[in-house]
Amino acid sequence: MLQVKPVPPERLPALLRRMPKAELHMHIEGSLEPELMFAFAERNGMSVPYADVAALRRAYVFNNLQEFLDIYHAGTLVLRVEQDFYDMAWAYLQRAAADQVLHTEIFFDTQTHTGHGLSAEVVINGLHRACVDAKEQLGISAALILCFLRHLSEAEAFEALEQALPYRDKLVGVGLASSEMGHPPEKFAKVFARARALGFRLVAHAGEEGPPAYIWSALDVLKVERIDHGVQALRDPALVARLVHDHIPLTVCPLSNLKLKVFPTLVQHNLGRMLEAGLVATVNSDDPAYFGGYINENFTQTFAALGLNAQQAYQLAHNSFAASFIDASTKQAFQHRLAEVFETFE
Ligand code: ADE
Ligand code: ZN
């Protein structure tokens, strides 16, 4: 690991913004900004049940994950045609590229949208077309991960997987999202086994609000390669030892944890302790339109709150590439660009 030159605290935000990084945990539906939501509603002949953008933003106050998911789900009602998915993803990809994200792995689900009468085809083709254009026009690489909704049944997850199979080559993996408590990973054992047999890469949200036991079963029953969130892991030293030993990455989302009251303040966030424990932690935005910031905002606010340093910034960015599903040579090339930025930063 590169030994990074010390950087004075007032220069750290500039370094965090400039450093190349990968984003591995963001839900594209959670990047739908209120302005775009009103624009889509208008062109689709619908209405948003808030007076204006400011009134909608004022409603973004949550006490837990479920309160957020209810509002988030209501926001997806304005997504009706392929172009909506394209425009939403394009807006996110532009912001990510501006934040020096070289590679992003985007979560989406089809179950929300098929529940509104849309086809999986409309969703996947719109998102994928934006990813292709972003590679060409913005130079950012993007991959799609289909999330199953864990508050629904495993049979419904199987149905979503089947509907996505004609578009298999547009997807890199599957994940597990939505209401965690009461919906343990093992509920989805069979569908994850099927996805694994089909060659999908596997991730799952676990230990966001839920107990360490859910992280154990995501690893041992679902056989996931990364844990999304995983901040509750520190409650279980044997689990931490396992995650460190197996180099299992954790896609941490500090502003999400703050807004959903997983931690009362950012100062109390355990990201610094995760790094000290040797965990392969990364920083991500989760649902940036709802949680007050894209990836660079997550980095700068968390570093300020926790007093993290340039060496830790390098570690987190290095981890983000290591934990990604890109091929080994591209990974190395990105990590080389990362080292260069740190070596030449003044
Ligand atoms: N879907 C969107 N954001 C989520 C989160 N933070 N946890 C679980 N499911 C989600
Ligand atoms: Zn998430």
Image: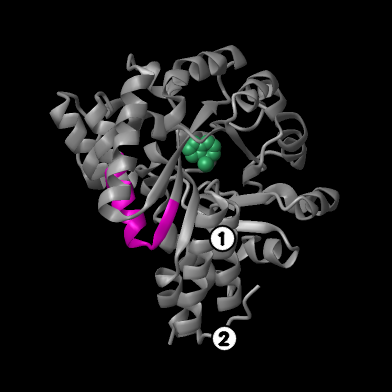
Instruction: Evaluate whether residue 78 shows in this view.
Output: yes
Q: Which residue is mark 2?
A: 5
Residue at x-position 48% and y-position 65%: 299
Mark 2 / mark 1, whichever is N-terminal: 2
At mark 2, the secondary structure is loop
Residue at x-position 34% and y-position 57%: 97
Specify the label residue 265 is tagged with: 1
Work out which residue is located at the far front of the displayed protein and give it.
329
Q: Where's the N terminus, which quadrant?
A: bottom right
Indicate the amino acid at tag 1.
Answer: Thr
Indicate the amino acid at tag 2.
Answer: Lys
CA separation in Å, label 2 and label 1: 30 Å
| Vertical arrangement, residue 154 with respect to residue 51, above or below | above
Q: Quadrant of residue 181?
A: top right
Q: Is 251 or 140 nearer to us in this picture?
A: 140
Kindly report the secondary structure that dominates the magenta region of the rendered protein.
helix
| Vertical arrangement, residue 59 with respect to residue 82, above or below | below
